[in-house]
Amino acid sequence: MDSDDDMYDSGDAEDADSDNDDAEDHTFIDKDTDGADVDAASHERSYTVLEEKDIRQRIHNDTEGVSTLLSVSRAAASLLLGRYNWSVNGVQEAWFNDEEGVRKAVGLFENPAGSYSVRTGGTRLFICSICFENYSIDSLKSTTGCCHLYCTTCWKSYISTSIDGGPGCLTLRCPDPSCSMAVGGDMIELLASEEDKGKYDRYVLRSYVEQTKWIKWCPGPGCECAVEYEPGSGSYDVRCLCLHRFCWNCAEEAHRPVDCDTVAKWMLKNKDEAANTKWILVNSKPCPKCKRPIEKNKGCMHVTCSAPCKYEFCWLCLGEFHNTSFACNRYNKDEHAEDERRRDMAKKPIQRYAHYYERWAANLSAMRRAVAGLRRTETTKLEKLGKIVPESRLAFVREAWLQIAECRRVLSWTYAYGYYLDEREFAKKQFFEYLQGEAEAGLERLHQCTVKELKDYLVDDTDYSDTNFRKFRAKVSSLTTVTGNYFENLVKALENGLSDVDVSRWTCNLCTSLNKRSTMKCKMCRTGKNPFGQGNKKKRRERGTETKKSEEKVERYK
């Protein structure tokens, strides 16, 4: 394959023309563009990121709409929306079908039993039903339409205690146990302290996001944005303004090409095994009979496995324990080899899991470092370079960093995909590993070009050359596009289950010839199908001799 520099020679002449360079500037995403995502520019979004001000505006609009339509107060409209999961259509449908039932469920009675009107003024005193103190009528309050009067001090205490108790204050009712009249936002605004008003307002905000069907909070650390997903738009992968990318469906980190069920299995396996794998390998031995790992933390070398196995063996040699004879002090080559073989078989599933887990974790860590690298580049490096290069011409660096982070994320989840790929589907596994290897190579080229070659323009800006910088920009932009397209096609292929692979044939590991699935040996070199995998035990023992003979046959064919 040609070098990276050779790949871009064809564009050098075009970049040398300054007029063309000015015309190309509009093709790059401006740093201050709303959202500023690579995928937002190249793919149609299936979601909308909502900041706090956007959510508040939506709450205001919905409340005003219901209030106007049903001729109720804004406080009552807010209670109605909260009852019906902030669905304007749901409120309208329920209201016009059974207004009385809706009022009763929410606590909005037009003419509650026992209600009365009280004239202000005068010297008559009333008793507060909570503190039993006498007050003038001007010092007593009741929720809208309710006949139960309480003093301002008791109301404030009641409201404060309810707000401190959590989101249940959104469905607060009259203090009288026999009354179901709702206490709305108008009473909160009138009587609550500023701190309690802020808490109540935050509960309303949370209620809107958590009860609206297609909106979820971003799980990114410290992020207060929410994401609205457009149903039926395809991929659940979304990216918030904080650059955290996650799956809207399961709220885990974005995990294409694997589905949510596979992610759940993988994460559960990691939780169960990651912390235990190393400890088990170091501190335990498998029972010679049932293969369960056993820890020896005290006592003599006589070990008895737990029920129902109850096999008695020597901890040192793993042989059957005999009280009258001790022979494990003597080295026996055959027994030692058999012990090693049994240990290797017991360790093989753990070693396979460790292989995929280590690479999955390493790529996720590299993805997070790439996001951190982007932030450092924006705040320091691009700021320095911006003194000699227009800011609009530096957006390609940000695109490249975002693409690197996205590709690292995809690459990490291909290892979870590979772990659950059926070992018996040899052709698919072989093709998958080839695609994965090519993806890693392409990503490394992009990373190398973006990180290391950019430093040349930051070490000494006196050596800056506009022509060389245009070449560098064209190279990085082309690599970003090519790498992004490759990874997108890789994701689609894996999501389709590698359906393009011809499973009716298999490829020989040695000479790469295609063979029919029904044949067990290669038609060209006569090597067994998958000689290093799940084949005949005898063949696996003789694989060294078999491979040597096969290589000699290939040489003769050549």
Image (cartoon, rainbow, N blue to C red):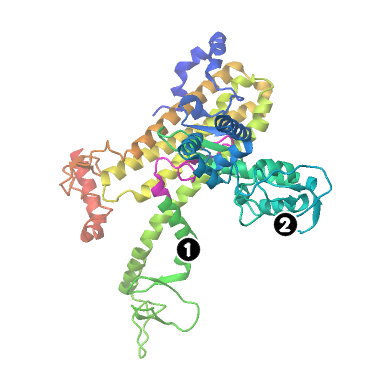
Q: Quadrant of the C terminus?
A: top left
Q: Residue at x 33, y 78 (%)?
A: 309
Q: Nearer the viewer, residue 234 or 188?
A: 188
Q: Which residues are magenta?
A: 239-263
Check if residue 248 falls in the magenta segment: yes
Q: Is residue 78 above or below residue 39?
A: below
Residue 449 in the figure: left or right of residue 542:
right
Q: Residue at x 45, y 48 (%)?
A: 359
User: Which residue in the structure is indicated by mark 2?
Assistant: 129
Q: Hey, which residue is sitting farthest bottom in the picture?
A: 324
Q: Is residue 538 above or below residue 526?
A: below
Q: Amino acid at mark 1?
A: Asn
Residue 360 in the figure: left or right of residue 516:
right
Q: Would residue 262 be seen by someone viewing this image from the given angle?
A: yes
Q: Is residue 167 above or below residue 477?
A: below
User: Which residue in the structure is indicated by mark 1?
Assistant: 276
Q: Residues within 10 Å of mark 2 (few under 14, many from 20)?
A: some
Q: Amino acid at mark 2?
A: Ser
Report which quarter residue 553 is drawn in.
top left
Q: Is residue 383 above or below residue 206?
A: above
Q: CA distance from mark 1 to mark 2?
A: 61 Å
Q: Residues within 10 Å of mark 1 (few under 14, many from 20)?
A: few
Q: Residue at x 46, y 21 (%)?
A: 8
From the image, give the main secondary structure of the stretch colored magenta: loop
Q: Would residue 509 be seen by someone viewing this image from the given angle?
A: no
Check if residue 271 falls in the magenta segment: no
The x, y position of residue 454, in whole percent, is 59, 29
